[in-house]
Image: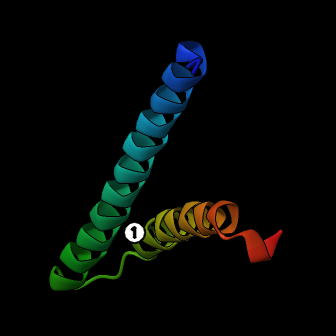
């Protein structure tokens, strides 16, 4: 049995990188919600915070949907 260690290392590196990227984007979405809530508590509205949160959460959902698409063979 032969293992392609280079391919295994590439898969591990890409998986780690995508995981870190999704966590960072999700954290930016939570930051956007917190900014919007903070602005609302101060008497104003922060549309930019909600837009940031929406885009970040949409990006996370797209990555998850793409991962499910890759895993489930009936979608191909």
Which residue is the extreme one toward the top? 6
Q: Mark 1 highlights which residue?
A: 49
User: Splitting the image into 4 quarters, where does residue 35 fall?
Assistant: bottom left
Q: Residue at x 39, y 69 (%)?
A: 49
Side of 43 where 51 appears, left or right:
right
Looking at the rendered image, the quarter that the N terminus falls into is top right
Secondary structure beneath label 1 = helix
Asked if residue 8 is positioned above or below residue 40 in the image, the reply reads above
Between 48 and 18, the one nearer to me in the picture: 18
Q: Residues within 10 Å of mark 1 (few under 14, many from 20)?
A: many
Which residue is the extreme one toward the front? 1
Where is residue 48 drawn, in percent x and y? 46, 68
Q: Residue at x 41, y 45 (%)?
A: 19
Q: Residue at x 55, y 19 (%)?
A: 3
Side of 73 where 43 appears, left or right:
left
| Colour convention of the picture | rainbow
């Amino acid at each position: 049995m032969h293992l392609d260690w280079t391919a295994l290392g590439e898969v591990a590196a890409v998986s780690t990188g995508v995981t870190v990227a999704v966590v960072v984007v999700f954290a930016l979405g939570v930051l956007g919600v917190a900014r919007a809530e903070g602005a609302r508590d101060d008497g104003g509205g922060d549309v930019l915070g909600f837009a940031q949160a929406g885009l970040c959460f949409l990006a996370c959902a797209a990555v998850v949907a793409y991962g499910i698409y890759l895993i489930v063979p009936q979608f191909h």
